[in-house]
Image (cartoon, grey):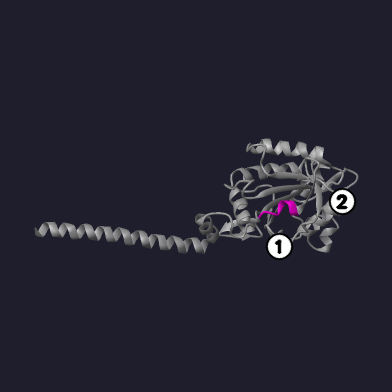
Amino acid sequence: MLTLALVAVLSCAWIGDSHGKEYVPRELREIGVAERLGDSVDQDLHFVDQDGEQVTLRDYLDDGIPVLLTLNYYRCKMLCNLQLNALVPGIKGNGLKPNDDYRIVTVSIDPREGPAVASAKRQTYLKALGMGADVDWSFLTGTKDQIDKLADAVGFKYSYDQQTDQYAHSAAVYFLSPTGKITRYLYGLSYLARDVRFALLDAAEGTLGTTVDRFLLSCFHYDAELGSYAAEAFEIMRLSGVAIVLALTLFLGAMWRIELRRRATEVL
């Protein structure tokens, strides 16, 4: 059981040729993420929130702010907790407010889970965030057909292992624009605050952030292989070169004015 979970953690589940598949358990061949960038989720999918209220995805996408989405399950004792734990620093440190600037939505992939376990999980992570009880992080549960439709929409492939009563799945965070369009994926068990911020800015389509953010975004590009925002070395070198030329120009101009004053003093 532990071995299966560890392999699931490490998989972003690209499996090699057909010969390699002979050595991979069926459960692991069926998990992973098939990116659906540019596609939109069905906003009419319905779930139940941690308070037992009936909700739809539209309820989280109706006021022009992006959504950070995760798919987990609340009884998970390993990967889900590791992923959500890793997400906390990215939420706390990204400089945006998970109330005014974006929403966080976690959906359980286990249809047997209900509001009680969702509420308990929410309280755990609100405490970990230390940002108050009104943080806009919803923990949802739902029926299998609604869960599967959402999972398929974002390309999340998972598998239930009846023997262990666990779900095999990979770790990913999904970013949705205010219109429900999938704009970015982040992978793994480490989410830099910078990457979370830039992904939210991308999802917001320029409606969040400052001039400094736009400058930084011009120096970073999303590296799909790394699952992270990487610096554009050429762009940074070009901008650094411009800054150096400007600095030298100002310095030489100041020195030239000092020299002119000195000569004028000598003449007098």
Q: Residue beneath label 2, please? A: 144
* Residue at disc 2, secondary structure: helix
Residue placed most toward the observer, 63 or 87:
63
- 264 vs 212, left or right, is left
* Tally of marks: 2
Tell us which disc is closer to us: 2 or 1. Answer: 2
Determine the image quadrant of residue 38.
bottom right
Give, as a single range, the part of the protein colored magenta: 58-63
Using the image, determine if residue 245 lies above or below residue 98.
below
Determine the image quadrant of residue 85.
top right
Residue placed most toward the observer, 55 or 98:
55
User: Do the residues under discs 2 and 1 have CB atoms within 8 angstroms?
Assistant: no
* Residue at disc 1, secondary structure: loop
Q: Give the percent coordinates (x, y) of residue 77.
A: 78, 39
Measure the C-alpha gap from mark 2 to mark 1: 24 Å
Q: In which quadrant of the rendered image does the C terminus lie?
A: bottom left
Q: Residue beneath label 1, please? A: 37
Q: Give the percent coordinates (x, y) of residue 210.
A: 52, 54
Q: Give the percent coordinates (x, y) of residue 246.
A: 37, 61
Residue placed most toward the observer, 262 or 31:
262
Q: What amino acid is labelled 2 in the image?
A: Lys
What is the crowding at mark 2: few (fewer than 14 residues within 10 Å), some, or many (at least 20)?
some
